[in-house]
């Protein structure tokens, strides 16, 4: 692999359109309104982008509706080839896309480049799934009719993406929608609109027809999204974000009975048994906790370590966390960039202060650095009280809270005692225990002796209040397809 050659932030910012992308054209928001995009490493404004109004949202949905019938009739191979070309373009421009993500979101360049490759892979995966959409044919049991099953696109979709993986969350939703024959309106997070605008340009260059993807950037999500969901023209909502917002969107989907898939919050348990390989467990912890500065729904939130190995595990983890370099993601050698904004950092500060007030010990980190930017140091806490606030909420920062346990039944029950159920991590060398605990955890995904579960070929999603449906894998395209049954007389 060639050595990355990252352009400057100024270069990538200059190359990205700042307008709305509707019906294949770039246009200003109604009234010419704009919103700032901030650099979380400095607090300074990077640029201004169009700030869409509800009318702009309706205009984008109208474009998607106009394009739906023709796009649904497009040959699967044609849809596949567009996705494949978009995959190749993302890979060719991975360095520039990484620099763009680092500028607007803060993650280190190497991690951002990894996201670019991950994002591209969704397009490659779903380019292959586009030509494998199958129906069925059989004779019904009473013999009077034959049953013909067709798969059809659900219709115009609304895709709402978060700020923490601004490119990959777009491709994870756009890829299966395009493959299935759906048109869409994409509303990215206001903190990170630039990656989505760049992605729209790449798709247009790959040959995607006008109106299939429309990108609406806005600071007024509620005003723009609600009328789209209640108006009866959006047939599918795919949302990634907090459980609280997810509940609101589900209520807004009810009047028009909009089909939904939701990837919501998490409170991931990370369980280390007494027989675990601690080298593997610590490495897994670094991945599960520190990916994206801990700003991930899959981030390990509650570390449950068997009392016989807890001190050694915590000490090793603290040494590894303390050795990480904190700074602007664009600076060489930096491992940990800033959190997304001041509100995110304040939340982490308050959660750590609450845990310490309840008796937790800080092994490393735990104090906010002075100076500009939204930085917070990698932190390891031991002796964390189960009553601490961070045990019942997503930390969304580089903080590992370590608790101890002695009994398998006890730790499984504690791990399951949450409204969330996205992912869990289990570290043990006992095969029977591996399978038993994986089955008992109330989550949609398990990392068994690994801290990384995300993969475009795997179904991503949770249970309980962590969401509905799955993204990725062979089932990911099903979220954008309906069955149609035709009865044919025998």
Image (cartoon, grey):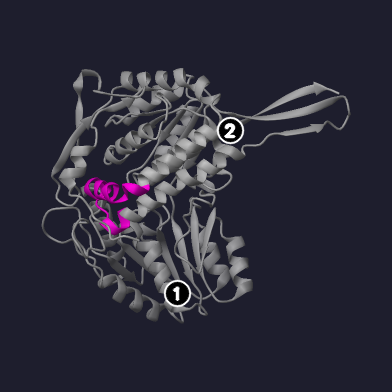
Residue at image mark 2: 481
Residue at image mark 1: 280
Find the distance from the CA under tag 2 to the CA under tag 1.
40 Å
Assign the magenta stretch its main secondary structure: helix
| Position of residue 127 measured from the top left corner of the image (x, y, whole percent) | 51, 41
- Front residue (pair 81, 231): 81
Taking the magenta stretch, the answer to whether it contains residue 486 is no
User: What is the secondary structure assignment of the residue under circle 1?
Assistant: helix
- Report the quarter where the C terminus lies: top right
Residue sitting farthest toward the right: 143
- Snapshot quadrant of residue 488: top right
Residue interval drawn in magenta? 91-112
Taking the magenta stretch, the answer to whether it contains residue 92 is yes
| Position of residue 448 measured from the top left corner of the image (x, y, whole percent) | 53, 66
| Position of residue 305 measured from the top left corner of the image (x, y, whole percent) | 45, 73
- Snapshot quadrant of residue 229: top left
Q: Is residue 242 visible?
A: no
Question: Tag 1 or tag 2, which sits nearer the N-term?
Answer: 1
- Front residue (pair 158, 201): 201
User: What is the secondary structure assignment of the residue under circle 2?
Assistant: strand
Image point 34% across, 74% down: which residue?
317
Vertical placement of residue 6 versus 256, above or below:
below
């Amino acid at each position: 692999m060639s050595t990355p050659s990252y352009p400057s932030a100024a270069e990538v910012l200059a190359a990205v359109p700042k307008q709305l992308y509707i019906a294949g054209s770039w246009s200003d928001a109604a009234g010419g309104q704009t919103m700032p995009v901030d650099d979380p490493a400095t607090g300074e404004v990077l640029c201004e982008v169009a700030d869409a109004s509800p009318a702009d949202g309706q205009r984008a949905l109208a474009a998607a509706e106009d394009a739906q019938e023709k796009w649904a009739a497009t040959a699967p191979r044609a849809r596949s080839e567009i996705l494949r070309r978009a995959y190749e373009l993302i890979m060719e421009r991975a360095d520039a896309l990484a620099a763009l993500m680092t500028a607007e979101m803060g993650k280190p360049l190497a991690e951002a480049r990894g996201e670019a490759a991950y994002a591209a892979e969704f397009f490659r995966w779903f380019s292959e799934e586009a030509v494998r959409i199958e129906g069925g044919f059989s004779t019904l049991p009473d013999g009077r009719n034959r049953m013909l099953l067709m798969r059809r696109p659900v219709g115009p979709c609304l895709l709402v993406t978060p700020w923490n993986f601004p490119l990959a969350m777009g491709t994870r939703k756009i890829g299966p929608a395009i493959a299935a024959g759906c048109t869409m309106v994409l509303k990215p997070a206001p903190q990170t609109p630039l990656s989505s605008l760049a992605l729209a340009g790449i798709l247009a260059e790959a040959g995607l027809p006008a109106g299939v993807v429309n990108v609406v950037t806005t600071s007024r999500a509620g005003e723009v999204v609600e009328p789209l969901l209640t108006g009866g023209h959006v047939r599918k909502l795919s949302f990634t974000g907090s459980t609280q917002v997810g509940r609101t969107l589900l209520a807004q989907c009810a009047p028009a009975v909009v089909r939904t898939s939701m990837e919501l919050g998490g409170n991931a348990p990370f369980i280390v048994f007494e027989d675990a390989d601690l080298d593997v467990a610590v490495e897994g912890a670094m991945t599960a906790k520190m990916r994206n500065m801990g700003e991930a729904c899959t981030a390990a939130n509650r570390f449950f370590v068997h009392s016989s190995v807890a001190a050694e595990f915590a000490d090793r983890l603290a040494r590894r966390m303390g050795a990480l370099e904190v700074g602007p993601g664009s600076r060489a050698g930096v491992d940990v960039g800033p959190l997304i904004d001041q509100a995110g950092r304040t939340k982490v500060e308050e959660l750590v202060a609450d845990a310490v007030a309840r008796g937790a010990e800080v092994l490393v980190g735990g104090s906010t650095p002075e100076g500009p930017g939204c930085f917070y140091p990698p932190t390891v806490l031991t002796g964390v009280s189960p009553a601490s606030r961070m045990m019942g909420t997503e930390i969304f920062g580089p903080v590992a809270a370590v608790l101890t346990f002695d009994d398998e039944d006890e730790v499984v029950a504690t791990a399951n005692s949450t409204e969330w159920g996205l992912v869990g991590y289990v570290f043990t060398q006992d095969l029977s225990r591996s399978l038993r605990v994986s089955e008992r955890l109330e989550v949609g995904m398990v990392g068994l002796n690994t801290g990384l579960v995300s993969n475009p070929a795997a179904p991503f999603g949770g249970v309980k209040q962590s969401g509905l449906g799955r993204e990725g894998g062979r089932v990911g395209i099903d979220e954008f397809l309906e069955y149609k049954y035709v009865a044919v007389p025998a």
